[in-house]
């Protein structure tokens, strides 16, 4: 049986932690933490939710690449969104406050094995310097045997942005 504790003071107060992951509970771009622990002397598991209260003026961009697939019997005039796709690569470039080029990258759902506790999207932290991105690049894995490279490039993107991108291959 699961029990959920919302009133946890800090990470050190959680005893017998089994596993932890980051998750954006409030959908505000700030990654909070979920910790799974075992109740002392029992087989019960407890989920602890810790809100990240470090409220700095840091910026982010959140990207989710969707498959664009429909399960069956999809009408032709309806665009299917599908589900989040494993494997897309997201990268941004921008100038920092000192005028130097800054970039970062991440993959979406890079692991699919046992106890994969990854976010269904990619969150890229931008720090305090950027209020827009010069370029955002997204690369999507292709099917075996295909030669076309699926990629998307966006320029002049505002921070605190949430993007949903559909796979153009579908």
Image (spheres, helix red, strand yellow):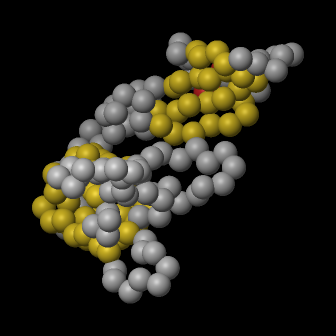
**Closer-to-camera residue (55/23):** 23
Q: Position of residue 102 (x, y in %)?
A: 30, 67
Point 20% across, 60% down: residue: 133
1 sits to left or right of 168: right
Q: Residue at x 52, y 33 (%)?
A: 33
Q: Nearer the viewer, residue 51 or 66?
A: 66
Question: Can you name the residue that lies furthest to the right here?
Answer: 41
**Above or below: residue 117 compared with residue 89:** above
Is residue 37 visible in the rendered image? The answer is yes
Q: Residue at x 57, y 39 (%)?
A: 21
Which quadrant, please, contains the C terminus? bottom left
Left or right: where does residue 84 sit relative to residue 118?
left
Front in this rendered view, residue 139 or 99: 139
Q: Residue furthest front?
A: 73
Q: Quadrant of residue 155?
A: bottom left
Residue 98 visible in rendering: no
User: At 66% from the left edge and 54% from the top edge, which residue is drawn?
Assistant: 113
């Amino acid at each position: 049986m699961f029990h959920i504790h919302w009133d946890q003071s800090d990470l050190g107060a959680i005893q017998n932690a089994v596993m932890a992951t980051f998750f954006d509970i409030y959908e505000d771009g700030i990654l909070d933490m979920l910790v799974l622990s075992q109740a002392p002397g029992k087989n019960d598991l407890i989920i602890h939710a810790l809100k990240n209260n470090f409220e700095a003026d840091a910026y982010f961009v959140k990207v989710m690449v969707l498959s664009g697939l429909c399960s069956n019997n999809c009408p032709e005039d309806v665009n299917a969104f599908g589900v989040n796709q494993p494997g897309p690569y997201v990268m941004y470039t921008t100038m920092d406050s000192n005028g130097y080029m800054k970039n970062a990258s991440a993959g979406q759902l890079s692991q699919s094995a046992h106890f994969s506790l990854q976010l269904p999207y990619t969150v890229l932290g931008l720090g305090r310097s950027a209020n827009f991105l010069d370029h955002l690049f997204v690369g999507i894995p292709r099917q075996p045997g295909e030669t076309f490279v699926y990629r998307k490039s966006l320029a002049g993107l505002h921070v605190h942005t949430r993007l949903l991108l559909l796979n153009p291959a579908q």
